[in-house]
């Protein structure tokens, strides 16, 4: 008999209910698309940049992450939440590559940085009373589950927050693209892009151009045509082609994360 320690993927014997055993059977058979397990609750994908975790510095700032976790906790029960985190507070693959490191190896280092952020956020969410699961695109069974869309959906249906780490598990992909891809696979209603230092999308960089005006809403076509960097172009095109809306909002402000999760229009809405 295979011992639990030697399993490299979720096993049907780990299921806690008949319905979860069905999900695991289908996932192991490769059926991870097309069933979004809809409930009456709003389902969102929250994208958090790595810089937010560091509070503008290298590493993790505990007070900042605790504040984020408490705001996410305030929306529990009312909305199904999945989160994609960046790793820029530790490593940025593109920047390391520009300084002479092999791009593929640099990107893998960045993926490991995102997992560290996942674990930090998980810890503070659990302290706030929120049941949380981390799923990683790179297998590391001692600290995270492997990424399985149906299992992520099942966790959210049970009221758990799911945090996706390690990007896509492949180099050359940004965490913006990961956010769009994960949102589509889990059937999210909207992608929420949390920004630090800016409260939405502007006609120009508001830090450099005082005359820059904020958009209340715009379309993906307008953003792509005018080279407005809401997120990277691959991610925007993916959202546009699949009719997935997005809201860009500022992290600053009391309760902004909670308000965004609950559906308040506090930033810029981007639609097809």
Image (cartoon, rainbow, N blue to C red):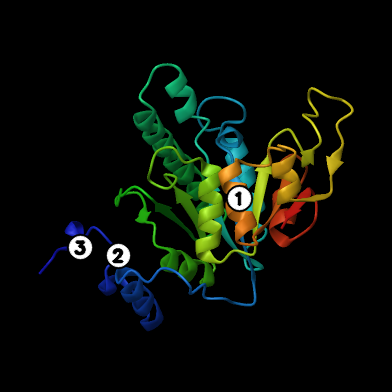
Q: Which residue is label 1 attached to?
A: 237
Q: Which residue is label 3 attached to?
A: 4
Q: Which mark is residue 190?
A: none
Comparing 153 with 78, the one in front is 153
Q: CA distance from mark 3 to mark 1?
A: 42 Å
In the image, which is nearer the foreground, mark 1 or mark 2? Answer: 1
Query: In this view, which residue lies farthest toward the left?
Result: 1
Note whether 72 is above or below 66 in the view shown.
Answer: below
Q: Is the C-beta separation of discs 1 and 2 under 8 Å?
A: no
Q: Secondary structure beneath disc 2?
A: loop
Q: Residue 42, can we see it?
A: yes
Q: How many marks?
A: 3
Note whether 216 is above or below 77 in the view shown.
Answer: above
Q: Which residue is label 2 attached to?
A: 10
Of mark 3 and mark 2, the one earlier in the sequence is: 3
Note whether 112 is above or below 93 in the view shown.
Answer: below
């Amino acid at each position: 008999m295979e011992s639990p320690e030697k399993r490299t993927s979720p096993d049907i014997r780990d299921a806690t209910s008949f319905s979860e055993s069905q999900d695991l059977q289908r996932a192991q058979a490769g059926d991870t698309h097309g069933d979004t397990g809809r409930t009456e609750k709003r389902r969102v994908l929250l994208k958090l940049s790595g810089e937010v975790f560091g509070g503008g510095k290298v590493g993790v700032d505990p007070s900042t992450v605790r504040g984020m976790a408490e705001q996410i906790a305030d929306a529990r029960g009312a909305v199904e939440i999945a989160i994609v985190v960046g790793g820029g507070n530790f490593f940025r693959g593109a920047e390391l590559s520009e300084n002479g490191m092999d791009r593929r190896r640099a990107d893998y280092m960045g993926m490991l940085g995102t997992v560290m952020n996942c674990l930090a956020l998980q810890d503070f969410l659990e302290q706030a009373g929120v049941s949380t699961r981390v799923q990683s695109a790179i297998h590391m069974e001692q600290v995270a589950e492997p990424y399985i869309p149906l299992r992520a959906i099942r966790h959210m249906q049970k009221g758990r927050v799911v945090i996706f780490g390690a990007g896509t598990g492949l180099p050359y992909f940004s965490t913006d693209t990961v956010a769009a891809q994960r949102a589509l696979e889990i059937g999210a209603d909207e992608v929420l892009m949390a920004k630090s230092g800016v409260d939405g999308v502007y006609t120009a960089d508001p830090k450099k151009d005082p005359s820059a005006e904020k958009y209340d809403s715009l379309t993906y076509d307008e953003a792509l045509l005018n080279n407005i960097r809401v997120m990277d172009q691959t991610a925007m095109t993916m959202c546009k082609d699949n009719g997935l809306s997005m809201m860009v909002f500022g992290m600053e402000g009391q309760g902004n994360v909670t308000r965004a999760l609950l559906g308040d229009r506090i930033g810029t809405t981007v639609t097809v």
